[in-house]
Image (cartoon, rainbow, N blue to C red):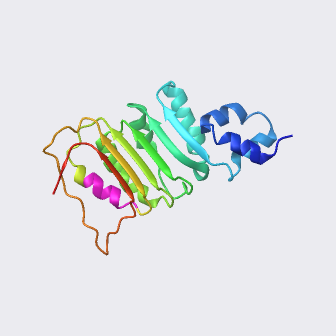
Amino acid sequence: DLSNEVFYEIFEYLDACEIYYAFSNLNYRFQQLINSSLLLLKLKLDDSQSEEIFINNYQQILHLNKGQIFSIHLWSSENTNQIISIFTIDSSFNCLESLVFYTIESNVLISLLPTLTCLPRLFSLTIETWSNIKDLGNIYRLIFNLPKLKYIKFKAIESNNFDIIISLPIATNEQISSIEYLIMDHHCAFD
């Protein structure tokens, strides 16, 4: 009979969806392990699944286990925007430390970033967009307002316009950023 700690270590290597599919209906003990606040979940949603399975995974895991989710990775050109549009981010995601968005549209990103300020432990944010973003300065101002963020990687694939000017806010007593690592993977000029 293996201890709960051994199962928690095994679960660290699995995605939340894999844990639920493999263990949720197995027996009472596994149900208790999965619902325990000691289990931190990594949620990876991608478009390799059918849209119905994708949405069901989102609803079943994301809504029921907000307080256990440690990281969320969304890979999808169509479903990312759909999930984010119905994705209510609030302080009940009290363990969420890392968000990764691939192929997110710039308008969705601009509406999403202000909602992330309520996350008490969001330390890492990775954004990759295929959109040609013209208002990078506004996006960076929203990113710098995230109170706990330490790492940001922002990649704009089609942002190959060398004329894009970014005006980064100067740190003042009113606005001091906690960011330690800033990776800007796009063309730009600073003002």
Q: Is 144 included in the stretch rendered in magenta?
A: yes
Q: Which of 10 and 100 is in front in this view?
A: 10
In percent of width and height, residue 95 lies at: 57, 55
Indicate the quadrant containing the C terminus: top left, top right, bottom left or bottom right.
bottom left
In percent of width and height, residue 89 lies at: 47, 52
Q: Tell me if 1 is positioned left or right of 117 in this view.
A: right
Residue displayed at 48% across by 58% down: 119
Q: Tell me if 140 is positioned left or right of 56 in this view.
A: left
Image vertical order of residue 71 relative to residue 157, above or below: below
Q: Nearer the viewer, residue 112 or 71?
A: 71
Dominant secondary structure (helix, strand or loop) of the stretch shown in magenta: helix
Residue 83: image quadrant is: top left
Residue 84: image quadrant is: top left
In percent of width and height, residue 43 lies at: 55, 40
Q: Can residue 23 be seen in this view?
A: yes
Q: Which residue lies furthest to the left in this view?
A: 163
In percent of width and height, residue 113 lies at: 37, 52
Indicate the quadrant containing the N terminus: top left, top right, bottom left or bottom right.
top right
Q: Is 55 included in the stretch rendered in magenta?
A: no
What residue span does the magenta drawing correspond to? 138-146
Q: Tell me if 95 is positioned left or right of 179 in this view.
A: right
Counting every numbered tag in the picture gives 0
Residue displayed at 66% across by 36% down: 19
Residue displayed at 52% across by 37% down: 44
Residue displayed at 49% across by 25% down: 48
Q: Which of 118 and 124 is in front in this view?
A: 124
Q: Can residue 32 be seen in this view?
A: no
